[in-house]
Amino acid sequence: MSSNSLVELDRLHLVHPVASYRGHERAGVRVLKSAKGATVTDSTGHSMVDGFAGLWCVNVGYGVDSIVEAAAKQMRELPYATGYFSLGSEPAIRLAAELAERAPGDLNHVYFTLGGSDAVDSTVRFIRYYQIARGRPAKDQFISVEQGYHGSSTVGAGLTALPAFHQGFGVPFHWQHKIPSHYSYRNPVGSDPAAIIAASTAALRAKVEEIGGAERVAAFYLEPIQGSGGVLVPPPGWVKAMRDLCRELDILFVADEVITGFGRTGPLFACEDEGVVPDLMTTAKGLTSGYVPMGAVFLSDHVYDTIADAAGQGVVGHGYTYSAHPVSAAVALEVLRLYEAGLLENGRKAGARLMAGLHSLADHPLVGEVRGRGMLAAVELVTDKARKTPLPAAAEPARRIFDRAWDNGLVIRAFANGVMGYAPPLCCTDADIDAIIERTRMTLDQTL
Ligand code: PLP
């Protein structure tokens, strides 16, 4: 089919996720055709380094035959098995065990979803069940962090704190609350780590009081590094301080590792950086590296046991047709093998090169801040460095930066507030990383 007719069919029929519908109809779709390693090629034959791993997900890179073979083998053998009625499949059971073995602390129980949004959604259901089961039904309020992203389900979009996910939808709900982000480049308390940690813990205490005390609060959600908010890296010790405060207040602590999980920041899970063990943890993306859909909720022993004991022989009514899908599980097992056969190690090396390369751009007149950890990074653009004047907060300048990078052979995420986001595949070679840096510099020069 010709590119022109695809563009027209797309315009008429395909509703895109998180898009300006009318803007998209005007601009038209760009069709990606093929990919290998860290390189993607569009339908015009234009090749680019994928500096964003699809949507922060293709951690292993594209075109890995062993993953294709694992999926095909599973499809031939057993393409589907439900987990209902106490049925199961070997890959799903093995995957749960392998993940539990590697997860922090006592996160020993794994519930599989189709992605990140329904993983977050599932945590809310599990947490409500848990709090009711332990005789605390009034604990029905949830707190998350401004600039946070927790997906686009009806419930998760309310824990998300990005305006586009609320406007026009009638969310967040009255039981969903936020505290300010740690965003150190633009924090009213300045960039001193101790001051930011003190401000955040004080904000959480104040929010809990405002809601009616800890006896009303079920859980607190954070991302170890805020992704969709613009790759906002908290100061060292921030995640641990928030975790400790939740324990003190008897509030469940949920780490949303949908982006940061599976090697993106260096270790398998970013919580490991601070030795933090959450009560619940959500993952997706890197779990299958985007080859097939899958997410996973990790439940600690005490959360799982409380729910299981309360239900007794009764049913815990939460599940999907595609929970623990055997093909997704077979893919995830192979992806996990690849992480440990050298991919995590390569990601750590490539991440150091990426961060060094991006920092070498810090003296560019447009660069306000370079931040990140491992293979997760951002360059925040400003029009005046001294005043930290942001680029106009409109879709258009971001679109132009995205387009220029694309023409230069680089896929990045261009956030509406002038932040360039990076999450390349962990398989990147030195040459891939150097191309990302060089093409970023070209894009910045053209943006001056
Ligand atoms: N949580 C976080 C931290 C995310 O970044 C995302 C997606 O980017 C989600 C949840 C939702 O995941 P999905 O898009 O797979 O539903």
Image (cartoon, rainbow, N blue to C red):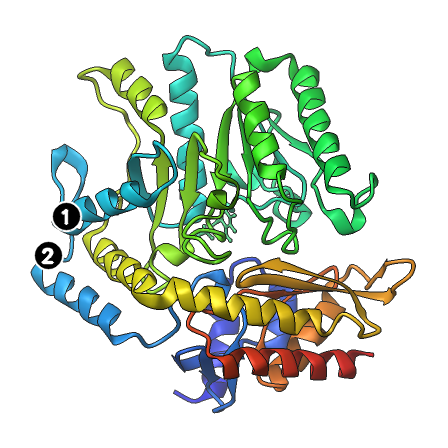
For residue 20, say whether it is visible: no
State the CA–CA distance, disc 1 to disc 2: 7 Å
> Measured from the top left, where is residue 159 in percent x and y?
57, 37
The C terminus: image quadrant:
bottom right
Quarter-of-image position of residue 187: top right
In the rendered image, the residue lying farthest to the bottom is 45
| Residue position for label 1 | 81
User: Callout 2 environment at 10 Å: few (<14), some (14 to 19), or many (20+)?
Assistant: few
Mark sitting on residue 296 = none
Q: Is residue 291 left or right of residue 51?
A: left
The structure residue drawn at horizontal position 32% and vertical position 18%, both measured from the top left corner, is 306
The structure residue drawn at horizontal position 43% and vertical position 89%, both measured from the top left corner, is 2
- The residue closer to the viewer here, 196 or 299, is 196
Identify residue type, mark 2: Leu
| Position of 367 relative to 177 (above/below) | below
Identify residue type, mark 1: Ala
| Position of 411 relative to 302 (above/below) | below
The N terminus: image quadrant:
bottom left
Label 1 with label 2: CB-CB less than 8 Å: yes
In the rendered image, the residue lying farthest to the left is 77
The structure residue drawn at horizontal position 47% and vertical position 46%, both measured from the top left corner, is 257
| Residue position for label 2 | 78
> Measured from the top left, where is residue 146 in percent x and y?
67, 40
Quarter-of-image position of residue 29: bottom right
Q: Tell how many labels.
A: 2
- Element at label 1: loop
The structure residue drawn at horizontal position 43% and vertical position 57%, both measured from the top left corner, is 263
For residue 400, say whether it is visible: yes
- The residue closer to the viewer here, 438 or 148, is 438
